[in-house]
Amino acid sequence: MSEKLTIWVPMDSAAKALCADELAADIAAEAAGRGVAVDIRRNGSRGMVWLEPLVEIDIDGTRLGFGPMTQADVPALFNGLATHPRALGPVDELEWMRRQSRLTFARCGVTRPLSLEDYRAHGGLAGLKRALAMSGADIVAEVTASGLRGRGGAGFPTGIKWKTVLEAPGAQKYIVCNADEGDSGTFADRMIMEGDPFSLIEGMAIAGIGVGATKGYVYLRSEYPDAIRVMREAVTIARAEGVLGGDLLGSGRRFDMEIRVGAGAYVCGEETSLLNSLEGKRGVVRAKPPLPALAGLFGCPTVVNNVISLASVPVIFEKGAAHYASFGVGRSRGTVTLQIAGNVKRGGLFETGFGVSLGEVVDDLAGGTASGRPVKAVQVGGPLGAYMPREKFDTALGYEEFDAVGGLVGHAGLVVFDEGADMLEMARFAMEFCAIESCGKCTPCRIGAVRGVETLDRIKEGDGGAIELLSDLCETMKDGSLCALGGFTPYPVMSALTHFPDDFDRRKEAAE
Amino acid sequence: MHAQPPAKAPEREDIDAIIAQHHHLEGPLLPILHALQEAFGHIPEPAHAPLAEALNITRAELHGVISFYHDFRAAPAGRQVLKICRAEACQAMGGAALAEATLKRLGLDWHGTTPNGALTIEPVYCLGLCACAPAVMIGERVVGRVDAARMDRLLEVVGA
Ligand SMILES: Cc1cc2nc3c(=O)[nH]c(=O)nc-3n(C[C@H](O)[C@H](O)[C@H](O)COP(=O)(O)O)c2cc1C
Ligand code: SF4
Ligand code: FES
Ligand code: FES
């Protein structure tokens, strides 16, 4: 028997949701039936979700793609690859791949997620090695120089946060990774945890030695059972291999971490609510100050960072801050991991320098809607982000650029709607979601959101006078809420009302 | 997490063993609640007193925590739990109509269980499968691009 044929089938949960596991089993059975020796490797996703399950076959070091694969397409994989009905050619040469600048996601979909050997072979641990030879202050300075800003929503400069924790007095400090990823339209955190878990572990270890923290927690939402399994296994492997524990890569330095599972509360993505939840309390938002950086988990100085913020740290140390900062636009440096979702022809993850316009993403990369009908609106930045009409499609993806047009980059999820969308219903859903997920601490959020649903129901029934009430209510929520759940819910609501007033004018329908 | 609710009745020694197993953790309450729910399919009432005592909190505080989180149940669910995503990306692909049709077909409201105890339907707000919407999760199995036919097959398999 000659060499084994290497076949890659993703284990990412989006691929699984499209039957990747069944496909892997079928490929194995088909190969066995034909007496062909195969090595089926499970990778993460390349991010081309519309092509999932995307099977790759390694021919002399080139990975040829086939997708989207169905079980019926399996036998043909063994009958001359060039004529296979799902043949895509070399995966690295697909336009979607070529047009990206993959820094954070460089390994995702390429390697076996739980192989530390693959991780090392693709540049992994080079950053940690470099950081271990640096002082805490130099590590923090490197992060500051990279221009990295928090990818969890607020865009706060990561280096400044780390500096505060480094300089805070305290015998015990913590690194907490926010893996609550509750925003609709986002899945970058999930993809990297399932597809390249060691990058998050390495990033947290660098953060730990940088600020002087010896313990880390990943607060991972319960809705992600696959990510939980992969991260737990990765931590066990990293500990066994000296990437975590009492002697990091033989340096004598200490850092260890645990995976903790959330319990289905959206508000626990807010950092202080998250800390309360980790402590075993109700996930109620805390008033700031004190900043978590000074008094966070169990009152100790704590770095709270998003998954993508932390998973971007290794490449900053591997390639240098200047390299990372050479991507981007204005004060938004580095890459943005766009998540393209909803009603699109091509959905998935696309990593590129900040600065690409919303229109280019929606019309060009995503290829318009899956339904083929015109795009009506795009919600950017999750359930608290504004609905952007086509008139705003020339806005560049950047923190300040979006802020200037009343938008929010947030975690960089884009949800596209075709003209069938009823924007009054979307506004109502935003209020309903806020009412369901409110932590209950402030009245404008807890009660206001319930009133918001009622008011929108009145508008729906043709009571145009209630529109002014809705605007007032949104003002009250904006001004009187402690956190962005109550404070930002007015963005989707008011943007829907402002840009799509016809959907709120139900009097005609009622009269007709 | 979302384990299948097993038939196991909560015995005091099992409860104590679960508490003891996680007691050493920093912030042990959520890990203990998850473990209890995994073992018994819900947070059994007989666990409240020993848990409050072990963690030195009042029963009222404990109740406050349990009731705050959507995941924790006071009573067992059906043999399977189907979570249907209600969030925006799934709505953009017809998720709301799918959910409505499913509930209607089963004669249930959200959180309801079929009379034969086979299935409980829960809403979920994003499964991270927004690029292959609409999405659902049955137990821990994720399913994307769910249409009426696919939903019918799922319901048939679980005997709902
Ligand atoms: C209601 C609400 C939900 C949030 N959800 C998340 C989340 O799921 N993931 C996340 O990283 N940040 C979330 N945030 C932002 C966090 O509060 C915080 O800014 C972030 O974790 C800081 O990390 P970063 O600087 O790396 O972005 C949320 C904020 C609010 C107000
Ligand atoms: S705005 Fe809402 S979620 Fe935020 S602290 Fe207030 S009540 Fe809690
Ligand atoms: S529905 Fe996934 S294998 Fe049949
Ligand atoms: S919105 Fe349904 S999976 Fe994300």
Image (tube, helix red, strand yellow):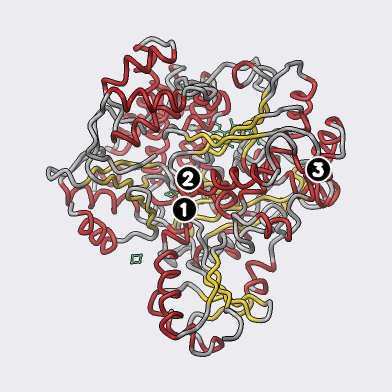
Q: Quarter-wise, where is residue A366 in the image?
A: bottom right
**Label 2 vs 3, first from the N-terminus:** 3
Q: Is residue A476 visible?
A: no
Where residue B159 appears, as percent x and y from the top left, is 18, 54
Q: Which mark is residue A184?
A: 2
Quarter of the figure with the N terminus of chain B: top left
Q: Is the residue at mark 1 in contact range of ligand 4, meaning its CB lies under 8 Å from it?
A: yes
Closer to the camera, A291 or B80? Answer: B80
The mark tally for this picture is 3
- Decide if residue A412 is on the left or right side of residue B39: right
Closer to the camera, A507 or A224? Answer: A224
Circle 3: element type: helix
x 67%, y 60%: residue: A118
Asked if A107 appears above or below A239 in the picture, the reply is below
- Decide if residue A480 is on the left or right side of residue A251: left
Question: Which amino acid does the dot numbered 1 rest on?
Answer: Cys
- Determine crowd level at label 1: few under 14, some 14-19, many 20+ residues with C-alpha closer than 10 A: many
Q: Is residue A251 visible?
A: yes
Q: Which residue is mark 1?
A: B130
Q: Which residue is mark 3?
A: A146
Question: Which amino acid does the dot numbered 2 rest on?
Answer: Ser
